[in-house]
Image (cartoon, grey):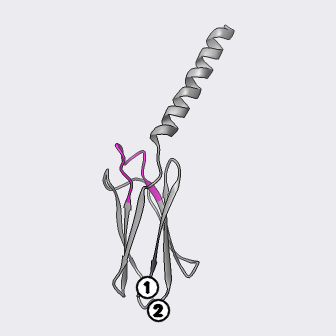
């Protein structure tokens, strides 16, 4: 009986390790700004965007959270594209976007308004 319990525990641990190995954070966050809108492209390639996806985007301007969006899935296997209305940002303002994976990890991108 102990052998069976150890075997099951070992298998569960290996499955957890393999699952974590397959999970990965977004690989890139690209940002562009046109004076009215912030365009966000998150590269997060997955095989099943209903189970492994970008779960949250947080937008910061000058270190302050100005917008946060939550997701229950990813629109495609390649990642996520969003448009965030941010009009009137002054020249030199720093915009940072943090993308959070539903399974593990984060990625961020930063842009300085020109």
Q: In the figure, is residue 89 to the left or right of 76?
A: right
Query: Is 89 contained in the magenta span?
Result: no
Say above or below: 110 vs 10.
below
Q: Residue at (65%, 9%) from the top-left corner? A: 3
List the residue tagged with mark 2.
90
Q: Which residues are magenta?
A: 43-55
Q: Residue at x 55, y 27 (%)?
A: 14
Residue 8 position, x and y percent, is 59, 18
Image label count: 2
In terms of secondary structure, what is the magenta stretch mainly? loop
Give the SS element for disc 2.
loop
Whether label 2 touches label 1, CB < 8 Å: yes
Helix or strand or loop: what does disc 1 sit on?
loop
The residue sitting at 34% across, 43% down in the picture is 47
Residue hosting label 1: 113
Residue 44 at x, y = what percent?
39, 54
């Amino acid at each position: 009986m102990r052998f069976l319990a150890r075997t099951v525990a070992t298998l569960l641990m290996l499955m957890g390790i393999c699952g974590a190995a397959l999970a990965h954070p977004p690989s890139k966050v690209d940002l562009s700004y046109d004076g009215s809108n912030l365009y966000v492209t998150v590269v997060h390639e997955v095989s099943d965007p209903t189970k492994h996806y970008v779960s949250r985007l947080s937008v910061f301007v000058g270190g302050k959270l100005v917008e946060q969006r939550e997701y229950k899935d990813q629109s495609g296997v390649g990642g996520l594209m969003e448009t965030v209305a941010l009009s009137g940002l002054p020249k030199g303002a720093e915009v940072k976007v943090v993308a959070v994976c539903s399974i593990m990890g984060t990625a961020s991108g930063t842009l300085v308004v020109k």
